Amino acid sequence: MMTRIVKDPIERRQEIVEAARDLFDRQGYRNTTIADVMDHLGIAKGTIYHYFKSKEELLEAVIEMTVDESIEQMRRLVDEMEGSALEKFRRLVEAGRMADEHDDILDHLHQPGNVGMHTQLLMAVIAKQAPLYAELIRQGCEEGVFQVEHPLETAEFVLIGVQFLTDMGIYPWAEEDLMRRAMAIPAMVEAQLNAPAGSFNFLIEQL
């Protein structure tokens, strides 16, 4: 008789989330079932439902893990990189997107019926990203490039404004509206930070 392996609940939950993300990436979210995850791991259906009530709830956990990994990468980048605040800003913005290999998961959030989850995800990301950008704003103030009285709140304001005015998952903006906003964003950020004119033109490339 085989000995039943009992895993630590945290380890088991992580294993389920990682397996689900792998399947979502390879098969697509819509084409993946709870049974697929169960078969992939060789576990009972009840084991998965002990941790997640539905596939949608499992998706939320996959997104949360992906976001946390992205934020951790950004944190390491901030801790390791050298240079001026503007140089770090550019590199951090480039690193601030969730990894391209999870496009199918993100595409699912852009569906009309997923606005609530999408907005919840964006707010969670902004809450975690804002302190990193606030550090760079403080550095820019010390360098005399920015003049900001409230670095964290300014970072939150800018991130929320840019995200909610350009994200197709929140509202299906017309292409001309997106382009109009994209062209205005650098000057708007510069105004918030009291930064030199043209110093944030690189943002247009990221939108």
Image: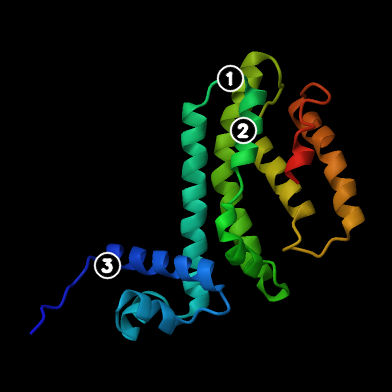
The answer to which of 161 and 37 lies nearer the viewer is 37
Q: Residues within 10 Å of mark 1 (few under 14, many from 20)?
A: few
In this view, the mark in front (1 or 3): 1
Give the mark, 2 or 3, whose residue is nearer the N terminus: 3
Q: CA distance from mark 2 to mark 3?
A: 37 Å
Residue at the extreme left of the image, as rendered? 1
Q: Which residue is mark 3?
A: 9
Residue at which label 1 appears: 83
Q: Of helix, strand and loop, which one carries label 1?
A: loop
Tag count: 3
What kind of residue is marked 1? Answer: Gly
Which mark is in front, 2 or 3? 2
Residue at screen point 70% across, 72% down? 111
Identified by mark 2, the residue type is: Arg
Residue 179's spot in the image, x, y percent?
A: 87, 49
Q: Quadrant of the N terminus?
A: bottom left
Distance from the alpha carbon under mark 1 to that under mark 2: 10 Å
Q: Is residue 120 above or below residue 38?
A: above
Q: Which picture quadrant has residue 88?
A: top right
The secondary element bearing badge 2 is classed as helix
Q: As displayed, is residue 23 above or below residue 11?
A: below
Of the pair 11 and 116, the residue shown nearer to us: 11
Task: Identify residue for label 2.
Answer: 91
Label 3: how many Cα within 10 Å (few below 14, some 14–19, many 20+) = few
Q: Is residue 120 left or right of residue 160?
A: left
Residue drawn at the location 82% of the way across and 36% of the way down: 188
Q: Closer to the N terminus: mark 1 or mark 2? A: 1
Q: Which mark is residue 119?
A: none
